[in-house]
Image (cartoon, coloured by chain):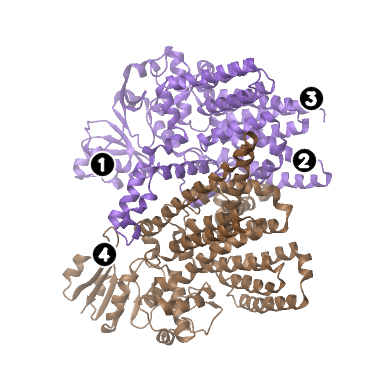
Amino acid sequence: MKPKIIKLLIITLTFLTLALLTKISSKIPVTIQEAKESYTAKTIISTGVDTNSQKPGIFFRTDNHYIPAIGVYSRIPPIALFGLNSFSIRIPLIFFGAVAIYLYYLNLKISGYRKSIIYSALFLILFSPYFVQTLLFSVSLVATMAYVLLVLLLYQKKQFLLLALVGSASLLFDFSAIVFALFFLAISLIINYKAKKSFVLLLLAILAILSPLILNQPLRQDLIKNSVVNSILPQSYGYVIGRRLSYDLTFQPQLPLVKYHINRLAFNKPFFTVNEFSKKIVDSFDYEFITSALKSEVIQGPRLKPGISLPKFFFWETPIILLCFILFYIKLPAAWKMFFYAGLIVLIIFPQNYFFQFLPLVTLLESLAIYHIFCRPHHRLIIGLFFVFLYLPSQITQFDFIANQPQQWFDSTDYVQYKIMSHISPQEIQNNRITITNRLGEPVFYYLYYHDIDPNLFLSTRKLGGIVDPGLQRIESIGNVYFRSFQYYESDRQKNQLWIGQEQEFNGPGADFRNNKVVDGDIVNTISNINPPEKSRFFGNQVFFVKTSFTSTKETI
Amino acid sequence: MKAKLISLIFLFVITLLGGFYRLSSLDISPPSLNWDEAALGYNAYSIMKTGKDEYGKSFPIFTRSFDEYKSTLPIYMMIPSIKLFGLNEVGVRFPSSLLGTLMIPAVYILAWLIFQKNIISVISAFSLAVSPWAIHLSQVNQESNTALFFMILGIILFLLSIKKHLLMPFSFVSLMLSMYSYNSQKVIVPLTFFIIIFLYKKNLLKYSNKTRLSSFIILLLFVIPFIWLTFKGQTFARLSTTNIFVLWKSEGQLTDISSGIGFLDFFLHGKFYSFLWDLTGRYLSYFSPTNLFLREPIEPVTILAGNSIMNPPEFIFWLIGIISFIPIIFKKKENLLFSSLILIAPIPAMFTWNWFQPGRTMLLFALYSVLVGFGVYSSLNYIKALISRFKPKLQFLSYSLIPVIFLVGFLSSIYVYESNLVYLPYRDFGNYQPGFRETVPFVAAIASNYDQVIYDTPQAQPYIFYLFYSHYPPEVYQRQIDLNKIGFPRKYSDFDNITFRRIYFPKDRLKHRLLLVGDQFSLPLSDVENASNAKVLQEVKDNSGNIMTRVVSLD
């Protein structure tokens, strides 16, 4: 086939895939990140300021963490054009997805790989489960992939001025991009320390990234909170040490060590730091989770891992990836090795979430392996069989899961919030006081997004509550709608209020769930099988919508 | 020579440390016996006293036990120990824990035979000595631990036999004993033989005819009864309840949606693919760092509270070990044998329904200890190479890694030990069928004063705990047991005046000369106090103060 036709085919395939994903994703509820980024974008469009009444800058604060600016800015045009809906908020995914693929293509081309290797790598990344799933939801992750590929491209082209400028722009992207850029530039700096001009440029870029992190304490703390550092700080496990030591006191076993307090050796901060750090590194290599999440989760029970639980790689890919890595890593160009090291540091600092940035490297290694095998004619049959009996069923199964069985894999918090919000009518919001529990995740931005609340109204009627972290403040209420956990029967109830919470939040005298009665109110709606987060599991597996009436339950009592 | 001596001193200290962790607390942790331990122990006691197992079979090769036909090698090994320590936790657990201790020098030798480096041998032995799995499972998984010991011994003897041919028959005996000891080994040992023959066919030809013939005869002596017992349904009896095919029916839940392509659904959308995923997922789960270093296993008996399979700081060396070993796999036969054993070790486990069951792949974990040793050695070389780039004279600094490793390993081992002695009995006592140890001797002492004893317990196989903790005379039990009545699979466990069933106090209280053993739900205190003929004789509480068993007498 002529190269032009192949190129055309790839472009068509890319856009068809992206369009298909956009179509599928429009049926799927938004994630909390999407809700925050989108509503911030809408607020900027309507008011010129963000959700904290600040002028738009390079960081955006929400109620409990920072969100990447790219997720906000990239959504401004589509939301301005099409309004706040799942189609408009996911259009940037197509853009960044296509840009990432194109930058990947350019990187492979400039690295001097054969066309067959380039095309197979493009094909593999485009249909990789990880890429497909990320394209459904996460603008900031896809944009970050495009960003890191751009950094790599500029380095390969030796355009250090642009590299320094682009490097500084990492602050607009995800935290992983900041760390990636920092380390990539640092490695470039070490390698190019003899070239004065590039040295100065790269140094300036590193300082440009570091200075906001040093000067902006809340941002720095949020970065630490999301990184491995948070887990290895003594305050994170001090209580674990105390708890473990306390067993000696409560249980009083026949333990010779206790007598001499030698067991302090096993419960001290330096050892725990080493231990916890090791655990965090292990977490990054949880290929069982990234290949068999559905299966292992079904069988092993809840894994307490946040997010979407579809496998990120096909189950048969793991040994292949490992082998490809060992066999072909050494043959990679220096720039790709730098890409690997910077990515590895990101992976260690932010376990789990950022294996995504490795994807271009993984698919490159896989395509190198395919090429290597394909060069031997008698092996082509093996590849053909492999394609028919493993690759095709895998893809079909994947799309089946994505399109037809979201309940198997979708994050339960997002799904429950979507259900809760769809059960609240605009009339209810306007006329009555509503209290929504925050035991199932902070509902504020889901509420703002799904009910498309006027940003001016939001800014004028919101009440801020306690400080979550330096610079980050909870939103307690917006107009008539309150966001907090509650003990229903002990709360200050008035007639015609709507209370939304887990079943145990309504427990108390007079509660009769079988007859839809609670004290002073009726259960008007129920959402079952909500699979709550671990910390809220004791509060039950159902959400109740209770309308206070002050008539029916008195009879029950 | 000096290095060898130092490494042997290290080995001695490490073995003492490992032995202390394994042998010093057998009666404390786990806090009571699980049903397999009780069954093994009572059958050993029975054979010791009468030459027959609980079902009256003389010196069996596999004993029926709970219809899964347990291997009897661990049982025979328990006899001297029970004679020495009595029929209790120490008597049951001592032989396996001793083998667990001997495994430390065995792994040292294995690592030496593969890599011929003192540092690798010492670190491998140290890793095994302080690994949570090795300490805990050597105490509670008698069958698999025994099998593991004989497996490693068999491989060592075989590798040694390449130079001293006479050792080959002994190697075969050891491997065959391993095969008879545990179910997983019934698959792994034959595969190991194939691998050995394939890799060492040229070496085997150099052995004398006498050696080969004697080895062959040993093989036949073991294999013939094995096949014969297979036809009798004993060898693979356990497989009928643990095999993965029980999942086949549930696959539809995930994939029962038609693709609309008719018969192609069979290939592209169906159970086969999902089932293949199940199998592969299980196989890979034994290589998953999260399962190995982070998460507690989910099988109750395999959990050492607060620990995973290996210590988390070992991960980095395990990973470096794998990465460094792959390029040298094909460099010599020992490397190929080592890697083949790693690859075959999870095969039996992948065909069972459990996702990750560490008790079935202990061989793999022992080999991982060797891999950790190799990882440390490779790390030292990497660091040395790195330092020599800048300051070749400072290469010796790389050795500072070794004391750091020993310090972290030692601290980890104290953590593991404390988990075993304090945390496990406190948190997971429920995994070990609690209550029998305290209740049964009391009940047994007065049982003859009553017409009937009714034992109500949520635990499975309560009869074996009664037999064990009451030291019930085996010859009496063998007389009482009626094989026709108990059926196959076993449905009936009553003997003498002991009946195992649910207590319904409103009805049972009307009877006389009855001893009831239940808990706070089957024998509520208020009901007992209201009954004029009832009297609470004993209550056993758990760590939190909840009543586990209550013994009530009805006059």
Query: Badge 4, how many Cα within 10 Å: few under 14, some, many 20+?
Result: some
Q: Which residue is mark 1?
A: A518
Q: Are marks 1 and 2 on the same chain?
A: yes
The residue at the far right in this view is A377
The type of residue carrying mark 2 is His
Mark 1, mark 3: which one is toward the viewer? Answer: 3
How far from the left and from the top, in percent, is residue A550?
21, 35
Both marks 1 and 3 on one chain = yes
- For disc 4, the marked residue is B520
What's the mark number on residue A372? 2
Of labels 1 and 3, earlier in sequence is: 3
Camera-side residue of B341 and A355: B341
Mark 2 and mark 3: Cα distance apart in space = 24 Å
| Residue A465, picture quadrant | top left
* Chain bearing mark 4: B
Whether residue A463 is visible: yes
Q: Label 3 is found on which chain of the structure? A: A
The spot of residue A91 in percent (x, y) is: 57, 23
Residue at coordinates 69% horizontally, 23% vertically from top-left? Answer: A156
Q: Nearer the viewer, residue A460 or A521?
A: A460
Query: Of the residues tagged 2 and 3, which is closer to the observer?
Result: 2
Same chain check for tags 4 and 3: no
Question: What is the C-alpha distance between the residues marked 4 and 3?
Answer: 80 Å
In space, the residues marked 2 and 4 are separated at their CA atoms by 69 Å
Q: Residues within 10 Å of mark 2 (few under 14, many from 20)?
A: few
> Where is residue A427 drawn, in percent x and y?
34, 25
Name the residue carrying label 3. A4
Q: Colour of chain B?
A: brown
